[in-house]
Image (spheres, rainbow, N blue to C red):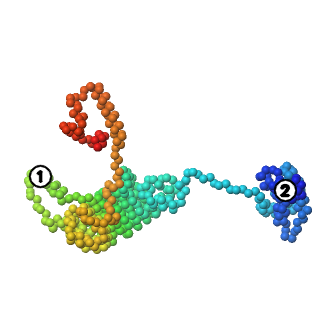
Amino acid sequence: MSSPSGDGGRRISGSPTAGGSREERGAFLPVADIRRITRKATPPNGEIDEEAVQELVSEARGDRSKRAKREAMAGDDLLTEMAKQGFQAYPHKNRVELPCTMKVEPKPLPVSDVRDWSELPLDALSAIFMKLGTIEILMGAGLVCHSWLVAAKSPELWRFVDMTRHKLVFSKPENVMCQMAKVAIDRSDGRMESFLVQKFVASELLNYIASRCNSLKSIRLIGACYFWDDEDVVIKLAAKCPMLEEIEYSGQKLTWDFFKGIGAARPGLKRLRVCLPWYDSDSIEHEIRMEQQQSDEEEEEEEEEPYEVWEARHNEEAFAIAESLHELRLLQMAGYGLTKKGVYAILEGCPHLEFLDLRECGHLQVNAELQARCAKIKHVRLPGGWPHVHCPELDIIEEDEGEVTELPDLYELEAQALRNGAAMDNVAMDNDDYGENYWEDYSLPSSPDSPVPTYSMDDPRYYWEL
């Protein structure tokens, strides 16, 4: 095909010397490309006549290109002309194989300055949530968005449920906390292995756990109230959980029949924690009897209890443990009234003991013999300041641990005091009467004759004095 520049048909406007815009030049075809397309469309036994190609190009350029007011031929022009020459069987193939002479560079996707945390993978979110506590997931992370809620429902997050040492335990109502605990139990899908709860536990919740957590290995009830509606609920739970190895029931004075029941339901128990604050029950009972005698008209002399009877009464719990729980590895009985006789019974009945905590046992007299008998145990805590090595296994969660006491705002108290003072000044100015010797109420504490004023902690003057 000849070009307007007179190059003998060797170039069309797809060459750099052709005129027109860059987009228009990219759609035009060199003569070499036209020959190649024609050759592909020709049968294997056919031949291409160079003069026929030139004539085909000239007719196509003179027909469609002139109508389009163009000086060169494009790919669509060539396909139309080839169809007229008898290449109807190949139009689709030829159109697909037309070469593209224009290169388009892909544009990069826009990058947002704010990262979308909801698009994090599920395993990454689960790994992050494992670092959070149970209450933080229920009240915070699981409520952010739908993808985080899906991650918060993964059963792996609820194998170990800890609802202790959090301020919401002390501020939320008991029924609300029980409902939150049930949600955690449901999300565990029967895989929960450890459950720690503080203060709000109820017998209904323990029955809920027993019916849905066959894999439970540890349950710790810290500061729980006495279950008056179902006194044997803990024993029933132990009987329904075949994998249970650890029980804690702290804050309540348990009797010997409780330990007998636990031993019958779960004789292979490994860890038992039954701590409570020490109080001298004998002194309290004696004071009550003295008050009753003083109120009676006829005073009768009280018969003194024999020491053997007194000792047997205070060691009932220790004897029950020694007879029923032979597989114990850890025992915490801080605050109980057992004596050395009860300790010796435990050491003989529980030969696998490795951890023994007898702190705050007021009736236990520590001597060299007791220390020698306890020497084979790995970690022992005895009453008094006896030397010991810190052991995390014997750490106690206190009943009020985690409670946050909010102090009053000192600035607000001071502002209120100033407002009250201004109101009193206005009243005094209206009455114009301060009373006699009013200065005695405002004498400085440093003066020798004036008493030191005492204020309550709610009064801002208390902090001024400090």
Residue at 83 percent of width and 59 percent of height: 30
- Circle 1: element type: helix
| Residue 436 against residue 146 in the figure, above or below | above
Q: Position of residue 14 (x, y in %)?
A: 81, 56
| Residue 447 against residue 367 in the figure, above or below | above
Instruction: Please rate how many residues cluster around mark 2, counting C-alpha atoms within 10 Å: few if below 14, some from 14 to 19, many from 20.
Output: many
The reply to whether residue 458 is visible in this rendering is no
Q: Amino acid at mark 1?
A: Gln
Q: Quadrant of the N terminus?
A: bottom right
The disc at residue 294 is 1
| Front residue (pair 52, 179) | 52
Number of marks drawn: 2
**Residue 240 image-quadrant placement:** bottom left
Q: CA distance from mark 1 to mark 2?
A: 129 Å
Q: Position of residue 301 (x, y in %)?
A: 9, 58
The disc at residue 66 is none
Q: Quadrant of the C terminus?
A: top left
Q: Position of residue 177 (x, y in %)?
A: 38, 54
**Residue 225 image-quadrant placement:** bottom left
**Residue 462 image-quadrant placement:** top left
Q: Earlier in the sequence, mark 1 or mark 2?
A: 2
Q: Amino acid at mark 2?
A: Ile
Name the side, left or right, on which 342 lies relative to 267: left
| Front residue (pair 170, 403) | 403
Q: Position of residue 165 (x, y in %)?
A: 36, 56
| Front residue (pair 444, 374) | 444
Residue holding disc 2? 12
Residue at 38 percent of width and 52 percent of height: 168
- Circle 2: element type: loop
**Disc 1 to disc 2: CB gap under 8 Å:** no
